[in-house]
Image: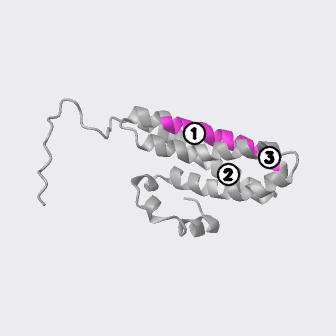
Amino acid sequence: MLNDPEYRAWLRTVPTDFTADPLWRMSAYRFSLFLMSKSQDDLAFILRCQETRALADQLIRAIGGISANLEDGYSRSSGRERAHFYEYSLSCSREGRGWYFRCGRAFPAKILTARISLLTQLVRILTAVVPEERNSNKTWRRKRDEPRVAPPPDHL
C-alpha cells in the first residue's frame, strides 16, 4: 500500500465513475493514475530546465501508457490476452522510471526519489501479475461448448 498523504488526498478526488469500476480494485491501476497526476504536476520542473525540456513528451507518454495498457488489458477476455497488455504496462513502468532518472537534474531529490520509488513498486506488482494472468484459465466470455441461453423477453 502506498503510504503517502498526497495519495490519500488524491484518492478523495477520483470520480465514482472510476472507483466503481472493477478495474479500480487493481492497486497498479490506482497507483498509475496517481503517478500520471503527479507527472503532470512535474512538467513544471522538466520544462524549466533546458536540458530536460525535450524529454517531457517521452516521460508523459511512458507514464500515461501504464494506466492505458492496464485499462485495455483488463477488458480482454483471456488471461493470456490480459498478460500481453499488462506486459506493456510493465514496459511503460520501466521506461517511465528511466525517463525520470534521465530528467533527474530538473527535480528536487525528494520528488525524484518518490517517483522512482513508485515506479519501482509498479514494476514489482506487474512483474508478479503478468505470469499469474498468463497462466490463468479465467475468461470473460462464454465458452463455445456452453449452451446459449435465451434472454428473458422484455415486458413493458
Marks 2 and 1: which is nearer the front? 1
Q: Would you say residue 134 is visible in this rendering? A: no
Q: Which residue is drawn at 58% across and 51% down?
A: 32
Which amino acid lies under the numbered mark 1 shown in the image of this protein?
A: Leu
Residue 83, image x, y percentages: 46, 35
Give SS at disc 2: helix
Marks 3 and 2: which is nearer the front? 3
Neighbours of disc 2 within 10 Å: few (<14), some (14-19), many (20+): few
Give the image quarter of residue 88: top right
As measured in the structure, the alpha-carbon distance from the residue carrying label 3 to the one carrying label 2 is 15 Å
Write down the residue under mark 2: 117
Residue 126, image x, y percentages: 53, 42
Q: What residue span does the magenta drawing correspond to?
A: 85-104
Write down the residue under mark 1: 90
Residue 50, image x, y percentages: 88, 48
Neighbours of disc 1 within 10 Å: few (<14), some (14-19), many (20+): many
Q: Can you say which quadrant of the picture contains the C terminus?
A: bottom left
Which amino acid lies under the numbered mark 2 shown in the image of this protein?
A: Ser
Give SS at disc 3: loop
Question: Is residue 66 shown above or below 20?
Answer: above
Residue 95, image x, y percentages: 67, 39
**First-in-chain label (3 vs 2):** 3
Main SS, magenta residues? helix
Marks 3 and 1: which is nearer the front? 3
Q: Can you say which quadrant of the picture contains the N terminus?
A: bottom right
**First-in-chain label (2 vs 1):** 1
Spot the residue most to the right.
Answer: 50
Q: Would you say residue 115 is visible in this rendering? A: yes
Nearer to the camera, 101 or 15: 15
Which amino acid lies under the numbered mark 3 shown in the image of this protein?
A: Cys
